[in-house]
Image (tube, helix red, strand yellow):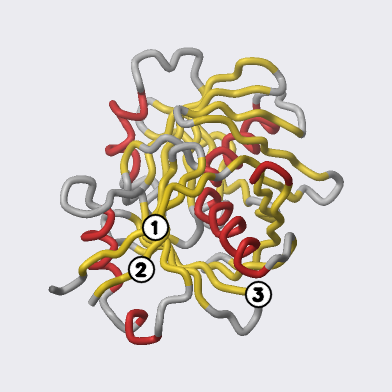
Amino acid sequence: MLIDFVKMQAQGNDFVILDHPGAALLNEDLSALAIAICDRHYGFGADGLVILTNSVTADARMIIYNSDGSRAAMCGSALRCLTRLQSKRTGRHCFELETDSGIKTCRLEPDDVCTVGLGKPQMLDANKQVDEFKGSLVDVGNLHYVVYTNDLSEAPHLLFGARLERHPAFPGAVNVHFAKLEDPQTITLKIWETGAGATLACGTGATAAVMSGILNHGLRDSVTVRMPGGEVRVSRDLPGGNFELSGKVFHIGTGQFKWKI
């Protein structure tokens, strides 16, 4: 079969997106499809496969698979990409999208800046010691381990990300981030995502890093997060403690993928 897709990226976090595919495709092995279509040599290349489909509880639903075929519960970058896609296809600027981690509020702002509400993350352990590292374990609909350090020059996410991702100290696979405090409103972040490895950006990871920084390192409530692929803004709304993630997204192109031919 020929599968129509859209390719989008948010700060270099790139996705192959299926916009409301037919029911027959949804009954296929989507894990296998994700592995094939996300392959950067034999497929179209992406950090994940994302499906935008119907929802009975929200305006639409996001389903996401990592490039290794594993199902992801949440992805802030993909959610922002779908915000632009859903807005362009409906003409609406504000709506709700269902995810495996609950319903999220989304809005498209000028210049293709997309802002999504991620709710109130859970700080599971603000100072969790794992081997030689002390970091924060944060649930943003998916699990993140954030380590603040004074030096990112040796790419610690590449050196230690794979080991920490599936460390027995965690209840399951975690996204691993190394953050550097630049000033009270700016951090730099290096990223290792479960199921994808080193990526250029991670929206929920940026949110987890800001939450950890607010509690442990004097960050303010609105922070610019610098990642290899670009910048996002993470803001905490007081007194509720809800977090918003904001940043530009980009439409790369469209195409067709030959599947099982």
Q: Residues within 10 Å of mark 3 (few under 14, many from 20)?
A: some
- Quadrant that contains the N terminus: bottom left
Alpha carbon distance from label 2 to label 1: 7 Å
Residue placed at 65% from the left, 22% from the top?
A: 186
x then y, percent, for residue 62: 51, 67
Residue at which label 3 appears: 59
Task: Please state which of the two labelled residues, at mark 3 or mark 1, is closer to the viewer.
Answer: 1
Q: Are marks 3 and 2 in contact (CB under 8 Å)?
A: no
Mark 2 residue type:
Asp
Q: Residue furthest left?
A: 261
Residue 231 appears at what percent x and percent y?
58, 30
Look at label 1 and name its amino acid.
Thr
Residue at position x 20%, y 71% in the image = 259
> On the image, numbered disc 1 is attached to which residue?
254
Q: Nearer the viewer, residue 227 or 95?
A: 95
Question: Where residue 29 appears, x then y in whole percent?
Answer: 26, 76
Q: Quadrant of residue 192?
A: top left
Answer with mark 3 or mark 1, whichever residue precedes in sequence: 3
Amino acid at pointer 3: Asp
Corner quadrant of residue 171? bottom left
Q: Is residue 204 above or below residue 126?
A: below
The crowd level at tag 2 (other Cα within 10 Å; few <14, some 14-19, many 20+) is some
**Residue that label 2 marks:** 4
Pointers 2 and 1 in contact (CB under 8 A)?
yes
